[in-house]
Image (cartoon, helix red, strand yellow):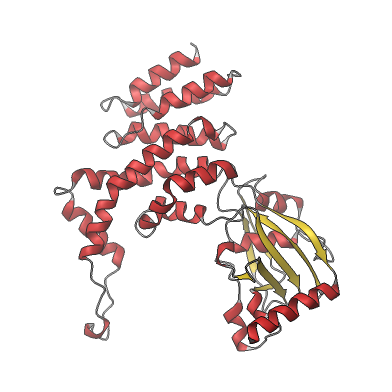
Amino acid sequence: MDLETKTQELLIKLTNPVTDQEAVMEQARDFYQTIFEIEDAKQVKTALQTLTSAFSVSNLFGGALAANLCGGLVENGFPPSYISEEFAAFFKNLLQRASTVIDAFEASYQEPNYEELGEDEEPEDKIEVFERFLEEITDEMPEAVQAFQAIDHYYSCGIALFSANPTEFQQGKTAIGQQVGKFAEYTSGGYWFSKLFQTLFQEPILVIELNARKGFIGKMSGIAENFQLQILLMTLPQINQQVAVSPLHQAVVKGVGEQNAGEAITGLWNMYDWTYVHQTGENSTNHWIWGEGVPADIPVFNNEYRVIILDTPSYSRGFPVQRMFQNLKADITIEKELDASEVEQWLAMMSSAVND
């Protein structure tokens, strides 16, 4: 049976809400195996685009299965451009329909009055309040609630598509980047899209290793969190006497190996922003670049570079060797190495700016 026939038969089952789910899963597995055998890019593109017509809010099982099939294929090397526009249009519409739920809740929600709470009382968790609210409005706003609940069934496909390369990332961010933040507190999909769209590409950086008086000017791309940033910095011989990050661990954080090594590596530094300069003592934590944060949080110095100052660690810390998004490639490119005198010049400029 050819790919076109298998695709059409799968589509019929995906869009039939009364089809036996196990039968659909079996046919989906058969389709998945078959498409890897097809070398004709046009046939593959047509098959994937056909599956996007199954995306649906009313038939959530079939639609979400179609999306997960597409996302899985992209994660395994199929071009995201085949269906990224179709997914973005569908998901944007989904967010627009679901936004009514968030608007209604936030208009009605009241922050707890801590002064009125008893000594042993804890305020009710906001998400618990929201979940109860969602149940209460289901009959009143069925379509909006249905769209809201669909977000977490579809988002993983979009993560696969929009983390595949910078072009798809920018298209996805343009299409839905402004809307997803509204859902970050209430859905997994909103949370992960918000994380993804904070990622920077070709972002100018200035890195200084204080103790060695070494540094460089360069750019960072595709780094989703600051733990990953530090491990990538540990791979650079320009600021390390000896690179102690194994090739396996390097592949993980660069986005070319397994997503998670299941191991940890000891960090080499405390990372600080440019306001740290030569400050020490208790207040130095005010200038930390937190591992749990993202590179977009790092302040820009002089409207030019995000500055990363590396100093002696306060204590030994293990960083998980992993990356947040499977498809997202990450790297740091060095455009200019700094000698000791240039490092001093930069530090003097920062110190002067702090004191102004």
Q: Is residue 351 above or below residue 48?
A: below
Q: Is residue 210 visible?
A: no
Q: Quadrant of residue 311?
A: bottom right
- Front-most of 310 and 37? 310
Image location (x, y in percent) of residue 195: 49, 56
Instruction: Name the residue located 64 percent from the left edge and 87 percent from the top edge.
Output: 355
Image position of 161 (left or right of 102): right
Q: Is residue 265 above or below residue 37?
A: below
Instruction: Name the residue located 37 percent from the left edge and 37 percent from the top edge.
Output: 90
Image position of 113 (left or right of 187): left
Q: Farthest residue toward the top?
A: 1
- Front-most of 90 and 203? 203
Screen quadrant of the C terminus = bottom right
Q: Is residue 19 above or below residue 355?
A: above
Image location (x, y in percent) of residue 180: 40, 52
Q: Is residue 122 visible?
A: yes
- Front-most of 12 and 215? 215
Image location (x, y in percent) of residue 224: 57, 56
